[in-house]
Image (cartoon, helix red, strand yellow):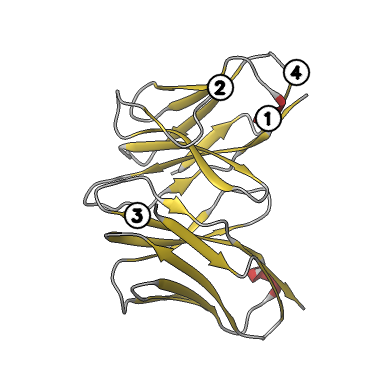
Amino acid sequence: NAGVTQTPKFQVLKTGQSMTLQCAQDMNHNSMYWYRQDPGMGLRLIYYSASEGTTDKGEVPNGYNVSRLNKREFSLRLESAAPSQTSVYFCASSAQDQVGETQYFGPGTRLLVL
Amino acid sequence: EDQVTQSPEALRLQEGESSSLNCSYTVSGLRGLFWYRQDPGKGPEFLFTLYSAGEEKEKERLKATLTKKESFLHITAPKPEDSATYLCAVLVGGSYIPTFGRGTSLIVHP
């Protein structure tokens, strides 16, 4: 099992450009999450999807959109990137059922917006 | 407001020098407390889940304990490879969104 995979690993954007971060999990988990991690700020939840077909805002959703494409895939889109979105982005998934509630994280996408 | 506080923010140890990391929480209806390890440039890696006060779990040189107000991650005779940031998170009530602390950065010198 690959667990949680993310693409790309690194990306440099210019202000105003758009991009989509991809995330996939092969653990048959119901719930998926997008976080950003900034120095001194810890992990902050951007969006989450409790199950296929549903998405909800987290703590810092402004400037982002998400799509739960199917049970495996959850993408994060930046429509018009801003320097404040320079960060490391992590996708996570969890079963959220009797199997367990532990989150499993991907390796991250490092994004620099110039 | 639910809150999770980790201390210290940073800890430097000599190899073999045992110590503890603290995660205190002010939440209602704790459903689970999680410990993660995060190496530089990587995603958090799951270590332990604790569900009730008095529970303990061990893995190699790490032991996690839980009380009604806090959790400790005890590191016995640490090695340089234990150097990482350790995160704790809590899950409360009917929510499936964990609240994370800001982490403790541990450096173990040889």
In this rendering, the label closer to the viewer, 1 or 3: 1
Report in which chain the residue with disc 3 lies. B
> Is A87 rendered above or below residue B33?
above
**Residue A64 pos. (x, y %):** 53, 23
> Is A17 rendered above or below residue A72?
above
- Amino acid type assigned to the residue bearing label 1 in the image: Ser
The answer to whether mark 2 and mark 3 are in CB contact below 8 A is: no
The answer to whether mark 2 and mark 1 are in CB contact below 8 A is: yes
Mark 4 packing: few (<14 Cα in 10 Å), some, or many (20+)? few
In this rendering, the label closer to the viewer, 1 or 4: 1
Residue at mark 4 to residue at mark 3: CA–CA distance: 37 Å
Between residue A112 and residue A59, name the one nearer to us.
A59
Quarter of the rendering occupied by the N terminus of chain A: top left
Disc 4 element:
loop
> Is B18 rendered above or below residue A37?
below
Q: What residue is at 39 percent from the left and 36 percent from the top? A: A32
Residue at the far left: name it.
Answer: A98
Disc 3 element:
strand
Mark 3 packing: few (<14 Cα in 10 Å), some, or many (20+)? many
- Amino acid type assigned to the residue bearing label 3 in the image: Leu
Residue at mark 2 to residue at mark 3: CA–CA distance: 27 Å
In this rendering, the label closer to the viewer, 2 or 4: 2
Mark 3, residue position: B91
Among the two numbered marks 2 and 1 on one chain, the one whose residue lies closer to the N terminus: 2
Mark 4, residue position: A14
Residue at mark 1 to residue at mark 3: CA–CA distance: 29 Å
Do badges 2 and 4 share one subunit?
A: yes
- Amino acid type assigned to the residue bearing label 4 in the image: Lys
Mark 2, residue position: A63
Horizontal relation, residue B41 to residue A107: left or right: right
Q: What residue is at 56 percent from the left and 22 percent from the top? A: A63
Mark 1, residue position: A84
